[in-house]
Image: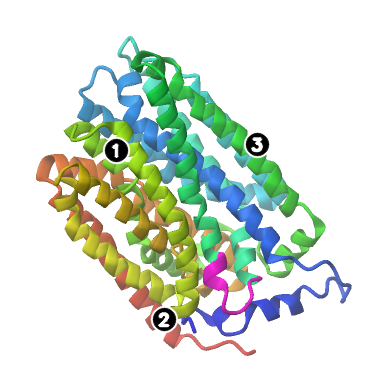
């Protein structure tokens, strides 16, 4: 049995049926089916990850040439990665802002506004002109749009993952926890395939002139579909009642930090190894290989797409493993494996085409196994009324601490000190994860168990 929290011991599935069997004085309402929530979670997360990878891939293949032509390739990619990080800095701000919007108006208003803002800022990037003059105006606009993307991503939290976690059958928490995470390799698969197709079918001039813009238009369309798929759930009476009965309501950020701020940071650092690995097998290798010219960039994308196909069943497998040995134990074990992978990384990345391909495929497999359980591993420690806001902010801070600057730092360190510095960077995330999990276990043993 998992030792994650008291929620693992009280039988969330049974408790959910009891809690949802009454409303306003005992009147019954339709039960919330975990399968329906899962569909909304997968669609919502896949659309967000598609946006994420569209920008990340373009930061290497497109932006240095289109927006920073006055810089050399290395400095252009570093500047693109610096702008890339702005969205992660903005996410907690977006969460705070849109939680206030939800308290003032409604959950559906918040979700509609945030996804509209996300889609608009994404499609506006596609309309930016090439920086032929070498000025800074377009660069500033790009940075502003990227920051707005982060604000919108922070506001897109719909509470469905928390509701799903509280309504899953006993012994299946790991399985349902991975469903939202499987959207990551799906999003990369779609975004990477689009860029690969455009980069191989178009001339370099056409690709940089207009071809790269197409994935950003697709991102807008996918956001519209995801919006309606999620609104179909969150605005219905039974889901609204279920969220209210589970006390999944926005809490003021100041109150959140005063009451259980320590849980935010424990949760963020517990997933640090997974979030750091996230960029070191997706975005960073593209930049490293593009600069070293050790193989054709289209071949790298093909291998990464193979890796994404491996990551999908690996993510699913993480759910099975977590239900057997516990989610925290799974995350700790994967952190150790990520540490071993970090030690091998310099030899693989600097070992020629075959070794680089092994790095990518193995890295994606590890990413699926670890990232599949990275979200919400310790958010069950939040008191129920803080879980909605706590889960959102924990995710924001995990991205900020673990992933926001990973491509920028890894590329900068590797160019200055060699790939061994990338190993040290990833190993530091492993250490943080293991320490956070240890602290979380110690806090749990001191926390009194709730009455059944």
> Would you say the magenta stretch is mainly helix, strand or loop?
loop
From what the image shows, is residue 112 above or below residue 32?
above
- Quarter placement of the C terminus: bottom right
Q: In this orientation, which residue lies closer to the viewer: 238 or 326?
A: 326
Q: Nearer the viewer, mark 1 or mark 3?
A: 1
Q: Which sits earlier in the primary sequence, circle 3 or circle 2?
A: 3
Task: Please give the label number shown on residue 224.
Answer: 3
Does dot 3 land on a helix, a strand or a loop? helix
Please provide percent x and percent y for residue 145. Answer: 47, 30
Task: Please give the label number shown on residue 84.
Answer: none
Which residues are drawn in magenta?
A: 167-176
Q: Do the residues bearing badges 2 and 1 touch, measured as CB atoms within 8 Å? A: no
Please give the residue where the numbered disc 2 appears in the rendered image: 443
Image side of residue 268 versus residue 13, left or right? left
Crowding near pointer 1: few (<14 within 10 Å), some, many (20+)?
Answer: many
Does dot 2 land on a helix, a strand or a loop? helix
Q: Which sits earlier in the primary sequence, circle 2 or circle 1?
A: 1
- State the residue at coordinates (50%, 37%): 149
- State the residue at coordinates (28%, 62%): 338
- State the residue at coordinates (56%, 43%): 47
Does dot 1 land on a helix, a strand or a loop? helix
In magenta stretch: residue 169: yes
Please give the residue where the numbered disc 1 appears in the rendered image: 286
Q: Which residue lies furthest to the top in this view?
A: 133
Q: How is the image coloured?
A: rainbow
From what the image shows, is residue 396 above or below residue 290?
below
Crowding near pointer 3: few (<14 within 10 Å), some, many (20+)?
Answer: some
Q: Can residue 405 be seen in this view?
A: yes
């Amino acid at each position: 049995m998992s030792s994650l929290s008291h929620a693992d011991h009280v039988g969330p599935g049974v408790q959910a049926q009891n809690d949802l069997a009454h409303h306003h004085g005992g009147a019954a309402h339709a039960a919330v089916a975990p399968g329906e929530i899962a569909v909304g979670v997968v669609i919502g997360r896949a659309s967000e990850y598609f946006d994420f990878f569209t920008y990340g891939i373009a930061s290497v293949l497109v932006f240095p040439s289109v927006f920073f032509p006055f810089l050399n390739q290395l400095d252009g990619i570093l500047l693109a990665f610096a702008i890339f990080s702005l969205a992660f800095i903005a996410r907690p701000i977006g969460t705070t802002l849109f939680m206030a919007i939800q308290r003032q108006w409604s959950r559906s208003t918040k979700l509609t506004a945030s996804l509209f803002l996300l889609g608009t800022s994404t499609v506006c990037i596609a309309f930016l002109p090439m920086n032929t003059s070498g000025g800074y105006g377009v660069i500033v606009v790009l940075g502003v749009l990227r920051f707005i993307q982060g604000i919108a991503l922070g506001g897109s939290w719909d509470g469905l993952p928390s509701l799903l976690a509280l309504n899953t059958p006993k012994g299946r928490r790991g399985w349902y926890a991975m469903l939202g995470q499987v959207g990551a390799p799906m999003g990369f698969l779609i975004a990477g395939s689009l860029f690969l197709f455009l980069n191989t079918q178009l001339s370099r001039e056409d690709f940089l002139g207009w071809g790269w813009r197409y994935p950003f238009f697709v991102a807008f369309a996918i956001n519209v579909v995801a919006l309606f798929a999620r609104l179909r759930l969150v605005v219905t009476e039974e889901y609204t009642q279920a969220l209210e009965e589970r006390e999944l309501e926005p809490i003021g950020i100041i109150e959140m930090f005063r009451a259980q701020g320590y849980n935010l940071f424990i949760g963020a650092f517990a997933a640090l190894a997974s979030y750091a690995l996230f960029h070191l097998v997706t975005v960073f290798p593209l930049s490293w290989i593009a600069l070293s010219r050790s193989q054709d960039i289209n071949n790298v994308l093909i291998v990464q797409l193979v890796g994404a196909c491996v990551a999908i069943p690996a993510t699913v497998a993480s759910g099975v493993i977590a239900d057997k040995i516990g989610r925290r134990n799974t995350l700790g074990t994967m952190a150790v494996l990520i540490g071993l992978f970090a030690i091998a990384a310099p030899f693989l990345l600097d070992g020629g085409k075959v070794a680089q391909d092994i790095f990518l495929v193995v890295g994606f497999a590890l990413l699926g196994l670890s990232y599949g359980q990275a979200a919400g591993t310790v958010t069950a420690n939040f008191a129920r009324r803080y879980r909605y806001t706590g889960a959102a902010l924990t995710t924001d801070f995990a991205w900020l601490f673990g992933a926001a600057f990973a491509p920028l730092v890894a590329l900068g360190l590797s160019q200055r000190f060699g790939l061994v510095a990338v190993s040290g960077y990833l190993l530091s995330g492993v250490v943080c994860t293991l320490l956070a999990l240890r602290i979380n276990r110690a806090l749990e043993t001191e926390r009194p168990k709730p009455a059944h």
